[in-house]
Amino acid sequence: MLVNYRPEYTHNWGSKTYYTQLRLDPLGAESGEEMLKALLDDGHDLAPLRRVIIQKTEGNPFFMEEIVQELFEQGTLLRNGSIKLAKSLSTTQIPSTVQAVLASRIDRLSPEQKDLLQTLAVIGKEFPFRLVREVSGKADDELERLLSELQMAEFIYEQPAVSDVAYVFKHALSQQVASGSALLERRRVLHQRVARVLEAQFPETVETQPELIAHHYTEAGLGAQAIPYWQRAGERALQRWANLEAINHLKQGLELLGSLPDAPEQNRPADEAQRCSLLLILGETQSRAGEYLEARETLLSAADVAHKLGSTESLVRAALELVRMTYTVGLPAPAAVRLLEEALQSLGPEDSPLKARTLGGLARYLVVTGEQQKLVLYASEAVAMARRLGDPELIAYSLLGMFYALMEPEHAEQRFAIATELLDLAKAANATTEIAVGLFWRGYCLLELGDIAAADAEFDAWGRWGEETNQPFYYSISALLRAMRALMRGRFEESERLAQQAFAIGQLAQTETAAGAFGLQMFALRREQGRLKEIEPVVRQFVEQNSAAAAWRPGLAVIYSELGLRADARAEFKSLAQHDFAELPRDALWMGTMTYLADVCTFLGDRARAGTLYQFSCRSPVVMWSLAMAWLATAPSLATWVR
């Protein structure tokens, strides 16, 4: 992608390895002289003028072109077979900026030419003939003549078009100066006229470019008319996964809504309903863009407005997005479950899509809190209700709760069947979000079941979906998956690079999830590199100082065993083995934990506990292999192990 920008523009690309800056310097004296010879003449008598222009413009090509045009229009230069200087160079006034040149040239236009140029500038940088005719109110013959004259003066160019003739300003500065030359009140009148013409006579613009109409109504000072178009523009950008563009449009609408004068009492519910709608879409968009902290505040505001309006549907919508952020990126949102439980009470006993989604949302949230019984209850109710309603997308949504209710490793095949059904239903309903969910969890189950090639195919498809939908969270997870697979193949440098990349993207989410995943991957990598000694003091101190760091204790036991610290390893292993390992959380880290404990068990020669570990994980091919090796290593003979 090639991008041009002015020196004062700031960006954060400079540190990226894939960014290269190419300076576009002004023309030097030799190149400037060559350009002016092409514009004027290479005659010796014009050489002093060429030097003055180069000095004045500092080699800016557009400035040079505009000065030459200005000198012709003011009569300093004449063309009569050849170009001659009609006035003394010492008496020639050359404006000091390109804006001043343009303003001077615009001032010399005839009133009708100037009036049309200002109208064009208000319409935009590009404008079709039909739109200009409707806004200006001029007859075709007169309009064509004036447009031709403005082309001759090199303010605008005709553009190739499929149907209607279209025009474009030669330069954005030309449009800017022309617009600024009109009085503010006249610009407002023109903006209003453009908006109404587009609204009434250009249905394709209403459909595909609502932000144009929103812009013109905003500039006309008609905020109430602009707000629905800003919302429509935000929704359309969101459909194209243009997340940052959507955020800008929606914020414009909210700012306008906040600046409107106080509405009469009877109109306030409509304004609040519009505010709620804008906040909901904005929160969902911020979440997709990885702005999770901002999204949480926006969605809580939306829920507050929905509560005041008594809108259960809007309340549930806000809560479901808060729940999604909780179980995907670990962002705490305790208000979400309260909102969903309130909504559930108000929905009554009848089946409804909203009630099924509420139940499904509660199930997803309970994954985080670990309330297994309630999780199974809500998930089962959500799936049963969705099936009774017969909505494929709703069934797919509800199935994820049931998937989470069966996260124990012994249910891997059952979860794989659920993920497969979820994906099939989502594809049938063309539900993009649920398609992504199905692809990821099918890949997860395949990896757990040991079908690595099939898992890779699912993760590749999921990664492509993430790129198409432009969501930082999915970029981060995709990089994590690639880092994992590189590590499994022994490509350590590639794995570390991808893990660093995932961490950098994940930090945009402003949560601790990225740091935790990065820490786990670097632990696994350093272990394979034989470098665990480097991180032993850090992990030991972390576990000692953080009561919530239980997930790292198997890793600490592995470090001790790798470093030959038998007494420390035995103490950690004994602590983890209490009640025959039954207290270890059977979550997404369980399989890795079992593998680590198998290695510690092997190091310690603890045959009795090797048998216990084996019985725990005989349904997981990956863990079963590690534990079988551990049991074999600790048994006194192969015959004993076989018995």
Image (cartoon, rainbow, N blue to C red):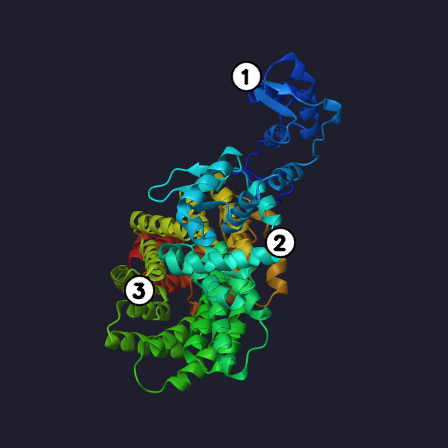
Outermost residue to the right: 90
Horizontal arrangement in the rendering, residue 464 relative to residue 551 (left or right): left
Nearer the camera: disc 3 or disc 2: 2
Of pointers 3 and 2, the one earlier in the residue sequence: 2
Please tell me the numbered disc located at residue 48: none
Q: Secondary structure at mark 1?
A: loop
For the residues bearing labels 2 and 1, Cβ distance under 8 angstroms: no
Closer to the camera in the image, 536 or 389: 389
Q: Nearer the viewer, residue 387 or 215?
A: 215
Image quadrant of residue 593? bottom left
Q: Mark 2: give few (<14), some (14-19) or many (20+) Cα within 10 Å.
A: few
Q: Amino acid at mark 2?
A: Leu
Distance (Cα) linking label 2 and label 1: 41 Å
Q: CA distance from mark 3 to mark 2?
A: 67 Å
- The C terminus is located in which quarter? bottom left
Position of residue 206 relative to residue 464, above or below, is below
Residue nearer the viewer, 191 or 214: 191
Q: Earlier in the sequence, mark 1 or mark 3?
A: 1
- Mark 2 or 1, nearer chain start: 1
Q: Is residue 99 left or right of residue 357?
A: right
Q: Image height check: is 60 above or below 398? A: above
The residue at which mark 1 appears reads as: 81
What amino acid does circle 1 point to?
A: Gly
Q: Secondary structure at mark 3?
A: helix
The residue under label 2 is 183
- Element on which disc 2 rests: loop
Report if residue 557 is visible in the image: no
For the residue marked with disc 3, what is the amino acid?
A: Arg
The reply to whether the C-beta atoms of the residues labelled 1 and 3 are less than 8 Å apart is: no
Write down the residue under mark 3.
415
Give residue 362's quadrant in the image.
Answer: bottom left
The residue at 48%/58% (across/down) is: 193
